[in-house]
Image (cartoon, rainbow, N blue to C red):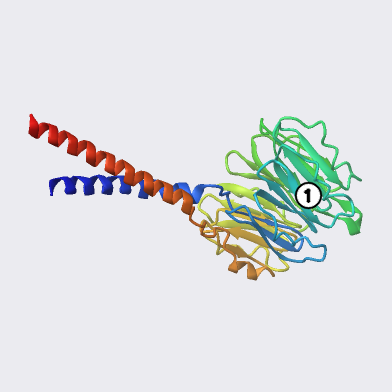
Amino acid sequence: MKNRKILLLALLSIALVFSLVLPTFVMAKGQVTPVVAAGSGHTLGLKSDGTVVAMGSNGWRQCDVGGWTDITRIAAGAYHTVGLKADGTVVAIGWDVDGQCDVSGWTDIAQVTAGYDHTVGLKADDTVVAVGNNYYGQCDVGDWTDIIQVAAGGGNKLAGRTGQTVGLKSDGTVVAMGYNDDGQCNVGDWTDISQIAAGGFHTVGLKDDGTVVATGQNNYGQCNVSGWANIIQVAAGGSHTVGLKSDGTVVAVGYNYLGQCNVGNWTNIVQVAAGGLHTVGLKPDGTVVATAYETELAKWNLKPAKPINWPLLGGIIAAVVVVGLVIFFVHRRRTTQTKRS
């Protein structure tokens, strides 16, 4: 009876340890951080299993991402979609008139971003590559070095004005190339910047102290961010700017024709994205909130339950049983030797 109690206690102890460790190991394996991205008229969601969902305008097949797998980052241009794969290669689909989807040869990419009609990739060695419309030099980034984040602006090709490319350097300064008639590339004096965002005709920078700076077109007040504080992420849309605060609430300024700035009641947000005429917010549980015409996004959940790895689970259970039996027989042998002595 005593031996049985010892065996049971040993098995329960080992099972308790694995019950604490196993769920984390099984659920974390192969998962990525969910994010949302917003284009001119479509929205993307990167799920924790590395797949992508999309909703909205699909005239150029920019939402046909159902077969994508092993994606770690996403970006939405005006009418094209870009995905970064776990192996550092890139996929893209959608409007490709200017070659903005010609990324099949890219390797060693660490981050991607998409503008109105160009695509930018940050390489693992902190250099930058770009393809697409280069009329204003927005793809002339081959000599950039020491870059830790890139952002691509929107613009408007119908108006003959296309976007900008912005790069954040490791020392907190910022560089920019591209269309600049509205001053969206006037970032040469920015310092202590920790994150950047590029909108239609404006550029936004988040400073280390949680305040925000902006430059460029301000006809709708999209650059009126000087009073913002405690911001941990910024996003720039067509003509509006969004800020995520440290308490999980959101602020927004700028063009609000479709209610894209109506985010005052949002809470518990961990990431925001700004599109042409809408704003998207991601919650910790993987659900999504949105303004304007993207209300269907409320049905999304970017953290689906990951299937249990049954072979792994079976192996762990077998290991637990073996260890328990070893403990039992070792103890039994010692008990027998003690009695003989």
The quarter of the rendered structure image containing the C terminus is top left
Please name whichever residue, 177 or 341, is drawn nearer the observer in this view of the structure.
341
* Residue lying farthest to the front in this orientation: 340
Tag 1 secondary structure: loop
Q: Is residue 288 above or below residue 184?
A: below
Query: Where in the figure is residue 184, as x and y percent of width and height?
Result: 79, 46
Query: Where in the figure is residue 15, as x and y percent of width and height?
Result: 32, 48
Q: Is residue 148 above or below residue 4?
A: above
Quadrant of the rendered image containing residue 261:
bottom right
On the question of residue 69 being in view, the answer is yes
Please name whichever residue, 213 or 131, is drawn nearer the observer in this view of the structure.
131
Q: Residue at x 37, y 47 (%)?
A: 318
Please name whichever residue, 288 or 227, is drawn nearer the observer in this view of the structure.
288
Pointer 1: what residue? 153
Q: Judge the density around disc 1: few (<14), some (14-19), many (≥20) Cα neighbours within 10 Å.
A: many
Which amino acid type is marked by label 1?
A: Gly
Q: Is residue 209 above or below residue 50?
A: above
Query: Where in the figure is residue 224, as x and y percent of width and height?
Result: 69, 52
Query: Where in the figure is residue 289, as x and y percent of width and height?
Result: 59, 64
On the question of residue 180 being in view, the answer is no
Left or right placement of residue 240 versus residue 142 in this view: left
Q: Residue at x 46, y 46 (%)?
A: 25
Q: Residue at x 80, y 45 (%)?
A: 104
> Total label count?
1
Left or right placement of residue 308 versus residue 113 in this view: left
Quadrant of the rendered image containing residue 150:
top right
